């Protein structure tokens, strides 16, 4: 008998060929989110969950007594209750690396869109006003020679740094474990404590995972340290940045703008963020290229198959599960 798998949302099928071959797949071929009630019904008999944008709570696990693997479609696995999964000896995997370049590109897109007022200029033209060039019109902020502060300097943070270097920017970063000084010197990316980074950055870009520790890592106190006229970018997770505090800093004029791909209460967006001209907002499209979404599907399927075959998957986020008898 083939193992039973639920795929909770429509992802590129090209990445799922092996999964369909080796497993009995219940594929939710829709962009509609499965209701919790239906989800709990459909997980009853499954061995593995390919988890796309649903919460893998302890409650869900309770409804899935045969569940052995939760394969998260994405590098950020904050929607999975990993502690509960580990207690139940359920392997949890994610999709690192394949998402890095697309997310870094989107981050840079937001940096350019907000500092050079691209989205605002686009809105003006599309509002059908008469086209008029003006020497003082839509003056933006030039990146060359400016300082980008990267909060969370892992795969995506470093990919953003590479792009910033190509734009002639200075790069500083913060994370819990600084790299060795010789590597910082080699890359010309320098570690700074968070407070110093916020004080020195012209643009701060967030790239930490969402954890208990990073919830509201950037709040009112942190935003107040930033230079007047600085920008903030968030393509990590909404709750890392206190949205109320952000709106206040944008309205007070302390921050010049914000580029956001993620929001504190997705899919809800703070209404004032929608009203402000100095925000550029995208609906969580960091990994949204066909190439990356297909690679994610393939990796998530592979993680799941390998784990079901009893082999060690390279992308397990709770390896301690293997030590449990
Ligand atoms: P990663 O390689 O694990 O990098 C995370 C970085 O954050 C590391 O440098 C880590 O360093 C640092 N960090 C972790 N906890 C921290 C803390 N409490 N304080 C300060 N720094 C901390 O992850 P990644 O692949 O770059 O992905 C980063 C995040 O981006 C993901 O978790 C996901 O939520 C988000 N993401 C969003 C999209 C999107 O569509 N918008 C797409 C992909 C990813 P230390 O451990 O040394 O602190």
Image: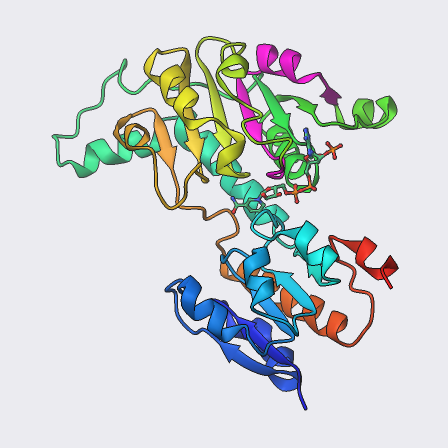
Q: Is residue 283 above or below residue 219?
A: below
Q: Nearer the viewer, residue 220 or 122?
A: 220
Viewer-closest of 192 and 146: 192
In the figure, residue 296 lies in which quadrant?
Answer: bottom right
The quadrant of the picture showing ligand 1 is top right
Q: Quadrant where the C terminus lies? A: bottom right
In this rendered view, identify the residue nearer to me: 164 or 135. 164
Residue at 23%, 18% (x, y): give it.
134
* 198 falls in the magenta region: yes
In the image, residue 234 above or below residue 295:
above
Instruction: Give coordinates of residue 283: x percent, y percent.
Output: 39, 46
Please say which color scheme the image uses.
Answer: rainbow
Residue at 55 percent of width and 15 percent of height: 222
- Identity of the residue drawn at 58% across and 67% down: 50
> Which quadrant would the N terminus be assigned to in this image?
bottom right
Question: Is 74 within the magenta?
Answer: no
Left or right, residue 275 beside residue 175: left
Q: Is residue 322 left or right of residue 85?
A: right
Residue 163 x/y as whole percent: 61, 34
Is residue 138 at least partly visible in the picture?
A: yes
On the image, the x and y values in percent for residue 229 come to 43, 12
Residue found 61% across the figure and 31% down from its top: 214
- Tell me where residue 76 appears, x and y as whole percent: 61, 48
Residue 162 drawn above or below residue 304 = above
Q: Residue furthest bottom?
A: 1
Q: Is residue 297 visible in this depiction of the protein? A: no
Q: Magenta region: which residues?
A: 189-211
Q: Residue 98, located in which quarter of the rendered image?
A: bottom right
Query: Is residue 219 shown left or right of residue 136?
Result: right
Q: How many marks?
A: 0
């Amino acid at each position: 008998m083939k193992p039973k798998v639920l795929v909770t949302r429509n992802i590129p099928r090209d990445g799922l060929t092996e999964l369909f071959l080796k497993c009995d797949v219940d594929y939710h071929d829709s962009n509609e989110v499965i209701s919790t009630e239906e989800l709990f019904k459909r997980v009853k008999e499954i061995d593995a969950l390919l988890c796309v944008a649903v919460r893998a709570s302890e409650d869900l696990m309770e409804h899935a007594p045969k569940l052995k693997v939760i394969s998260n479609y994405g590098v950020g696995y904050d929607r999975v209750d990993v502690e509960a999964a580990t207690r139940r000896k359920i392997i949890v995997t994610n999709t690192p690396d394949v998402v890095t370049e697309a997310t870094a590109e989107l981050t840079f897109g937001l940096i350019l869109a907000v500092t050079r007022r691209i989205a605002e200029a686009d809105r003006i033209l599309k509002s059908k006003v008469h086209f008029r060039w003006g020497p003082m019109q839509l003056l933006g902020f030039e990146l060359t020679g400016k300082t980008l502060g990267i909060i969370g300097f892992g795969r995506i943070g470093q990919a953003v740094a590479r792009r910033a270097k190509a734009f002639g920017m200075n790069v500083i970063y913060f994370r819990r474990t600084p790299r060795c000084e010789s590597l910082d010197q080699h890359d010309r990316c320098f570690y700074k404590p968070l407070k110093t980074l916020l004080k020195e950055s012209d643009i701060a870009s967030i790239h930490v995972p969402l954890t208990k520790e990073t919830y509201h890592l950037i709040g009112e106190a942190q935003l107040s340290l930033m230079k007047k006229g600085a920008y903030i970018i968030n393509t990590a997770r909404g709750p890392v940045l206190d949205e109320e505090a952000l709106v206040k800093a944008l309205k007070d004029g302390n921050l010049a703008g914000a580029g956001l791909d993620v929001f504190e209460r997705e899919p809800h967006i703070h209404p004032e963020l929608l009203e402000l001209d100095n925000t550029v907002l995208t609906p969580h499209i960091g990994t949204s290229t066909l190439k990356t979404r297909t690679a994610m599907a393939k990796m998530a399927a592979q993680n799941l198959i390998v784990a079901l075959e009893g082999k060690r998957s390279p992308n397990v986020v709770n390896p301690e599960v293997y030590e449990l008898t």
